[in-house]
Every structure is written in structure tokens, then in C-alpha cells.
Image (cartoon, rainbow, N blue to C red):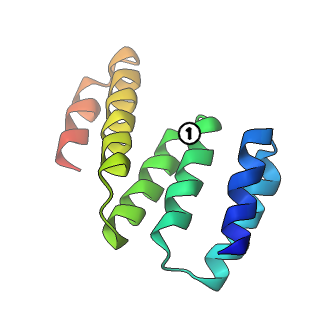
């Protein structure tokens, strides 16, 4: 957990690359720690990689239910849906509901 705390501390310093790789190290050590997936999802949000953030929040929630993670996941689906609608992919946006 020391490496996870180091990664969390690095995140506010906008050193996303180091934080990303530190979290990957933690993931190798404890591959089923839900908090690792949730923190990695937060980094993906900062990088505007919403699909990866969704995948990591889903994995975190499959390991451990946290209301805040579910709320963020719902917000990400909303943002992704808006982007699809604006791009003219209404059917794809509707299919997000079935995910």
C-alpha cells in the first residue's frame, strides 16, 4: 500500500506519468486491489481517456462496491453518451444504456 500512497501523492503534482507507472507497479504486486483500479481510472479522467476510465471503474466496482465510484462511472457514461450524440452516433449512445 506504500506504493499506492506514493502514486496518490504524485497525482496532484500533475506528474501523471510517474503516477501511472507507480500504480502499474502496485497492480503487479496486488492485482485485485479495487483502489488501484479506481485511482488509475482517476488518472485516465485527467488524461481525458474516458473509455479507459470507465473500464477501470467497472473493474474496481466488480471487486468492491463504493458509491462514489459508481457515481463517477455514471457520470462518465453520460459524458461519453453526449460525445457520441454530438458526433451523430445516436444509436451508439443508446447502446451505452445496455452496457
Q: So how many labels did they put on this image? A: 1
- Image spot of residue 97 (x, y percent): 19, 40
Q: Is residue 71 left or right of residue 21?
A: left
- Image spot of residue 53 (x, y percent): 50, 48
Name the residue rendered at 65%, 84% in the picture: 29
- Image spot of residue 96 (x, y percent): 25, 40
Residue 3's quadrant in the figure? bottom right
Name the residue rendered at 50%, 75% in the picture: 33
Image height check: is 27 above or below 48? below
Name the residue rendered at 47%, 58% in the picture: 56
- Image spot of residue 60 (x, y percent): 41, 64
Q: Secondary structure at mark 1?
A: helix
Name the residue rendered at 72%, 46% in the picture: 11
Q: Is residue 34 left or right of residue 18?
A: left
Image height check: is 38 above or below 76? below
Residue 78's quadrant in the figure? top left
Image height check: is 82 above or below 21? above
Front-lying residue, 59 or 66: 66
Q: Which residue is mark 1?
A: 45
Amino acid at each position: 500500500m506504500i506504493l499506492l500512497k506514493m502514486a496518490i501523492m504524485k497525482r496532484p503534482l500533475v506528474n501523471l506519468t510517474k503516477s501511472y507507472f507507480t500504480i502499474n507497479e502496485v497492480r503487479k504486486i496486488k492485482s485485485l486491489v479495487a483502489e488501484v483500479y479506481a485511482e488509475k481510472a482517476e488518472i485516465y479522467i485527467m488524461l481525458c481517456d474516458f473509455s479507459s476510465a470507465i473500464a477501470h471503474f467497472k473493474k474496481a466496482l466488480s471487486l468492491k462496491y463504493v458509491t462514489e465510484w459508481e457515481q463517477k462511472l455514471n457520470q462518465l457514461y453520460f459524458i461519453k453518451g453526449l460525445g457520441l450524440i454530438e458526433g451523430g452516433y445516436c444509436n451508439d449512445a443508446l447502446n451505452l444504456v445496455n452496457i
